[in-house]
């Protein structure tokens, strides 16, 4: 059992802190940086580290537990669990994610990230998904 990788959020971002926490932890999970048996920081500890209310962290942990990533025990830390097979996303969900990806790319371009840099990053990410 190892400790969780560091979670960072941007309190100045228009994206809600809870959403950032869920997204950051989910990224660590799908990229294999967190594995079954790994323990996340306690709700209060992570809230203090991030400078957010403990309910924000608690809700993020609950969402990840509902998705089948975490085992939550009252008074104990959240532990990563083995996630069983997930049903294929339906066409509506795929369209939703395609739209979000386009929005993210548009936001990157609006903030001055070069198209070639975006394309390179997407290619690298796609290669990691294949392995």
Image (cartoon, rainbow, N blue to C red):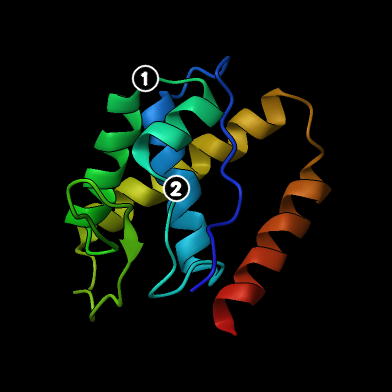
Residue at the location (82% across, 49% down)? 116
In front: 42, or 123? 42
Query: Disc 2 vs disc 1: which is toward the camera?
Result: 2
The residue at 25%/35% (across/down) is: 59
Residue holding disc 2: 41
Determine whether, in the image, residue 97 is placed left or right of residue 84.
right
Based on the displayed image, in which of its 4 quarters is residue 89 positioned? bottom left
Q: Which residue is mark 1?
A: 53
**Residue 2 versus residue 112: which sits nearer the camera?**
2
Q: Few, some or many C-alpha atoms within 10 Å of disc 2 (few <14, some 14-19, many ≥20)?
A: some
Task: Examine the rendered structure and indicate whether residue 129 appears above or below residue 17.
Answer: below
Neighbours of disc 1 within 10 Å: few (<14), some (14-19), many (20+): some
Q: Secondary structure at mark 1?
A: loop
Q: Where does the image place residue 26, in percent across and percent down from the top left? A: 43, 55
**5 or 11, which is in the foreground?**
5
Above or below, comparing residue 34 to residue 16 in the picture: below
Query: Does 2 sit left or right of 63 as displayed?
Result: right
Secondary structure of residue under mark 2: loop
Query: Left of 107 or right of it: where is 111?
Result: right
Image point (37%, 31%), residue name: 18
- Say left or right for 98 vs 72: right
Q: Which mark is residue 21?
A: none
Question: How far, Cα to Cα, is label 2 from label 1?
Answer: 14 Å
Residue furthest to the front: 75
Q: Position of residue 72 (x, y in %)?
A: 22, 55
Asked if disc 2 and disc 1 are in contact, CB closer than 8 Å, the reply is: no
Image point 35% across, 38% down: which residue?
A: 43
């Amino acid at each position: 059992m190892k400790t969780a990788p560091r979670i960072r959020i941007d309190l100045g971002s228009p994206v809600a802190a809870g959403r950032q926490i869920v997204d950051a932890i989910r990224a660590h999970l799908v990229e294999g940086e967190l594995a079954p048996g790994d323990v996340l920081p306690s709700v209060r500890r992570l809230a203090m580290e991030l400078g957010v209310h403990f309910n924000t962290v608690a809700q993020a942990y609950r969402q990840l537990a509902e998705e089948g990533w975490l085992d939550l025990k009252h008074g104990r830390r959240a532990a990563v669990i083995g996630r069983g097979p997930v049903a294929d996303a339906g066409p509506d969900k795929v369209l939703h994610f395609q739209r979000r990806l386009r929005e993210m790319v548009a936001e990157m371009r609006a903030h001055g990230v070069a198209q070639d840099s975006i394309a390179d990053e997407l290619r690298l990410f796609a290669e990691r998904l294949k392995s």
